[in-house]
Structure formats: structure tokens, C-alpha cells
Image (cartoon, grey):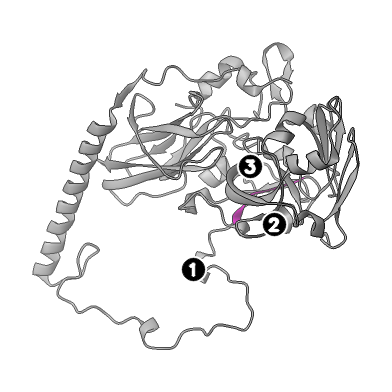
């Protein structure tokens, strides 16, 4: 099997550009914050003196009593599934703005990363990728078969599966097509459109190794064929080593049973690997001595390489990061102090560090990596920025526990063929901020 990490797309050494040591950076940020707060206090003082009300001070006016303090609230109903506030209706999944599929059966819907404050994506916002729509499966009638090169074929009902010892683990899931429309030029406007085929989830299920141990895998069995129960009968070939390592047979996410669009009642999940291999609506696993070379691993989900070659079975999602706030489509509220935030992740391990540049990569500062930092999981980073109102270009680069450095678009172009789109696109994402505070996508131009 060709391992994606064997063809390195790593950037130049991490200290190629000026990078402030963490302790110096912290001092500068502290000074910036104090200056910002002093300015706010001065503005508040002026408001008090004038007897006016402003954003930075309440002035001399009494604190108003809101209407919510004057009446009873909504009572607790006898039964109800809790929903977000009506004022959060804008926080929704969205289909791609670039590739239009009118039938909407083989399509995506993307996670609104710009509105996600933590590393967990709510179930109703986990991105979708379907090849024949979402099936409606009765869990009481669904079964999972394990057969092929095993000592004893097994057939599990959902009631059987939930009786096995379970585990819960935090991991990201990412489609290998994340960012494929923004390769040669900035086609998408927001981070939801550029990076929204990504979600952070608490997965609950049974380690596949437990089920395979009971079935008894033949020593000659080197691959497992996973098949879904959807209209496309989606299939993928997975090396037996991954099956026995950390692959899960999942029936719950974020503390509740899977949503239909995310594989209900049961799916496969391979931590750190492309979402396409995590077969949803899983109905069978067949142990074989070789991969099946399905369409989904030959004509699709492969990487164009120089000299007309294509790289197959490149399932690992390599180290990646993106600034989510401020990001494309946002409007900054004038010069001053901002906390820049984003996410980093790697299918090869943990995030070790994240650098952020405000000048298109000429200079870098080390961001704070916020805990918990977990294996193959979304990791949040943040850094203070005192914007002076001049044009700027924000971008981040992550380093994982293997030492791999997130590359630039130019770095990837050196080792991959130039085509209209690229799977496994993990290049740095630049956002341009103009003097008006408007944030736009400029990938491929920096």
C-alpha cells in the first residue's frame, strides 16, 4: 500500500521566517491588551463625563430592565428535543457554492466552522457527504455481517452490537475533497466553503478489533472490504492493520445515536483517515487477501502525480490548520485588539504547534495551542493581534507530533500534478484583510 506520508509535501524548515519566541510574544500581547483596555477605559470615562451611553461604558443612564425580566418564560414541556435559539438560525450546514448538483443525491453539506467556538461539532452541523442520498433504516431490521477469510462468519443485530464493550473517543473527520475547489484560485468566499467538510466529534462504538477477534481472522487475510446499505452500495478496501489498530464500529456521536445523514444506525470510523473510507450505514465487512480496487479507490479518491501517475490508497489526512476568525466574508469592526482563532488537526498524531502570520508568511508568531490536545482530534489555537487598520494577510501553519509541517500551495505543486482540483489538499489558507476590514479568500495568490 502506498502511504501518503511517503510523498512529503512539507514546507521549508519551520524557522525559515522570523518567528517570535513564545515568551517574547506573550509580553508583546500583554502590552497590546493593556493598551487596548486603557483605551477602552479612557473612552468609557469620556462617556461618563458626557452622560452618554456607548459601547465601552454605560454612562450616567440607569441600567435598563429588559422585557425578559418582566414576564414568565417558556415552561418545560412534557417531551421535547431541545433546539438552538431562534436567534442562531444562521448557524446551519450549507451545500457547496461552487459545484452545483441539482439532484442533491451525491453531494455535500458543510460545517459552519466560522461559528464553531470549540472542538466539538454539534450533531446537527456535522458535515455530510452522500453518494445516493440518505437511507431510512430501521435499526431493528438492520444487521452487520463479518465474513470472508475468518474462522466463523458472524451476523450482528444492533442489539448485539451495543452489548459489546464500548469506547468513546474524540476525533476529527474530514472529507479528502475538503478544499478541492480552492486549489488553483480562490473559488469560495467563506471558511465554511473552503474547509467545511470537517467536523470534530465524540464517537462511541465497539473497537473493530474486538469483533474480528471473535470472528477469527485468517493469517492470510490482509484487507477488509466495507460495504454500506445505501443506494450506492458504497464500498472501500481497508488494510487489516488499520482494522486491528483503532477502527471503530460506531453507533453514537456526541452522546446520542447517530443522525441518519451520518450513518444511522451504524457506521465505520477510521481515525485520521479520509471520511470516504468511514463507510456509513455499514452492512458487511469481508476479509480478503487483497484490495478490491473499487471505483471509489481507482477513478476517485486518488491523487494526480507527475508523469501521468495517480497515487492510490492515500487515506491519511495530513497536518492542516485554518484561521476561522477572522475569515472570508467577515467584516472587522475597525482597528484595535482582536483574538485570532482557528483549528488545527492531523491524521498522523497530535498537534505540536501552530504559527500565525499577519503579512502573508514573511514573519510568523507562535499561537497558543488550547487544550485538550488529543490524538487525531481538532485542536483550537488562538493569538492576539492589534490590527492597525492597514491591509494584512492572515494565515496559519501547523506542525504535528511527527514533525510534519503544513505546506503551502507552492510546496504541494512541486510534488503533485496540476489539475483543476486536488484531493487531500492541506495547504495553508490565506485570508486578506483590506483597509475597510473586509476579509477575503486569496489562496493561490500568496
Q: Residue at the top extreme?
A: 307
Residue at 16% across, 71% down? 59
Which of pointers 2 and 3 indicates the residue nearer the eye? 2
The residue that label 3 is drawn on is 98
Q: Quadrant of residue 297?
A: top right
Q: Position of residue 393 (x, y in %)?
A: 38, 34
**How many discs mark residues in the rendered view?**
3
Q: Residue at the left extreme?
A: 49
Q: Of helix, strand and loop, which one carries label 2?
A: loop
Residue at 84% across, 33% down? 217
Disc marking residue 174 = none
Which of pointers 2 and 1 indicates the residue nearer the eye? 2
Disc marking residue 258 = 2
Around disc 3, counting alpha carbons within 10 Å, would you say few (fewer than 14), some (14 to 19), or many (20 or more)? Answer: few
Q: Name the side, left or right, on which 233 lies relative to 96.
A: right
Q: Of helix, strand and loop, which one carries label 3?
A: loop
Disc marking residue 87 = 1
Q: Earlier in the sequence, mark 2 or mark 3?
A: 3
Q: Which residues are magenta?
A: 125-130
Q: Name the side, left or right, on which 182 lies relative to 217.
A: left
Residue at 36% across, 36% down? 367
Q: Is residue 168 above or below residue 85?
A: above
- Whether residue 115 is in magenta: the answer is no
Q: Residue at the bottom extreme?
A: 71
Q: Position of residue 309 (x, y in %)?
A: 73, 15
Which of pointers 1 and 3 indicates the residue nearer the eye? 1
Q: Earlier in the sequence, mark 1 or mark 3?
A: 1
Amino acid at each position: 500500500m502506498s502511504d501518503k506520508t511517503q510523498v512529503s509535501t512539507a514546507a521549508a524548515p519551520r524557522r525559515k521566517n522570523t518567528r517570535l519566541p513564545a515568551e517574547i510574544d506573550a509580553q508583546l500581547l500583554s502590552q497590546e491588551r493593556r493598551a487596548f483596555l486603557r483605551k477602552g477605559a479612557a473612552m468609557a470615562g469620556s462617556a461618563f463625563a458626557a452622560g452618554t451611553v456607548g459601547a465601552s461604558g454605560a454612562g450616567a443612564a440607569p441600567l435598563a430592565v429588559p422585557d425578559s425580566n418582566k414576564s414568565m418564560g417558556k415552561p418545560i414541556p412534557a417531551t421535547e428535543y431541545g433546539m438552538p435559539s431562534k436567534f442562531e438560525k444562521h448557524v446551519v450546514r450549507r451545500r457547496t457554492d461552487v459545484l452545483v448538483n441539482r439532484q442533491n443525491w451525491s453531494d455535500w453539506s458543510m460545517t459552519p466552522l466560522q461559528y464553531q467556538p470549540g472542538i466539538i461539532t454539534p450533531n446537527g452541523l456535522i458535515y455530510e457527504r452522500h453518494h445516493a442520498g440518505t437511507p431510512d433504516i430501521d435499526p431493528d431490521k438492520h444487521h452487520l455481517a463479518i465474513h470472508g477469510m475468518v474462522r466463523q462468519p458472524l451476523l450482528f443485530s444492533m442489539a448485539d452490537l451495543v452489548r459489546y464493550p464500548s469506547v468513546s473517543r474524540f476525533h476529527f473527520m474530514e472529507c479528502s475533497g475538503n478544499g478541492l475547489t480552492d486549489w488553483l484560485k480562490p473559488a469560495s468566499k467563506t471558511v465554511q466553503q473552503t474547509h467545511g467538510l470537517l467536523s470534530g466529534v465524540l464517537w462511541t462504538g465497539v473497537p473493530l478489533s474486538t469483533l474480528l477477534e471473535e470472528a477469527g481472522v485468517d493469517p492470510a487475510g490482509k484487507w477488509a472490504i466495507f460495504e454500506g446499505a445505501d443506494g450506492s452500495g458504497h464500498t472501500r478496501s481497508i488494510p487489516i492493520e488499520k482494522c486491528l489498530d483503532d477502527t471503530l464500529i460506531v453507533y453514537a456521536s456526541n452522546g446520542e445515536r447517530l443522525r441518519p445523514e451520518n450513518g444511522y444506525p451504524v457506521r465505520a470510523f477510521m481515525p485520521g483517515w479520509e471520511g470516504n473510507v468511514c463507510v456509513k450505514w455499514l452492512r458487511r465487512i469481508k476479509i480478503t487477501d487483497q484490495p478490491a480496487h473499487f471505483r471509489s479507490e481507482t477513478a476517485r479518491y486518488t491523487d494526480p502525480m507527475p508523469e501521468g501517475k495517480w497515487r492510490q490508497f492515500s487515506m491519511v489526512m495530513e497536518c492542516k490548520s485554518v484561521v476561522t476568525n477572522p475569515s472570508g466574508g467577515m467584516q472587522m469592526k475597525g482597528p484595535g485588539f482582536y483574538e485570532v482563532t482557528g483549528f488545527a488537526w492531523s491524521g498522523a498524531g497530535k498537534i505540536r504547534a501552530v504559527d500565525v502570520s499577519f503579512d502573508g508568511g514573511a514573519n510568523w508568531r507562535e499561537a497558543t495551542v488550547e487544550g485538550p490536545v488529543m490524538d487525531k482530534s481538532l485542536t483550537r489555537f488562538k493569538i492576539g493581534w492589534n490590527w492597525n487598520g492597514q491591509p494584512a494577510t492572515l494565515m496559519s501553519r501547523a506542525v504535528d507530533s511527527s514533525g510534519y509541517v503544513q505546506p503551502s500551495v507552492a510546496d504541494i505543486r512541486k510534488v503533485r500534478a496540476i489539475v483543476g482540483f486536488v484531493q487531500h489538499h492541506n495547504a495553508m489558507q490565506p485570508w486578506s484583510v483590506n483597509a475597510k476590514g473586509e476579509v477575503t479568500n486569496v489562496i493561490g495568490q500568496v
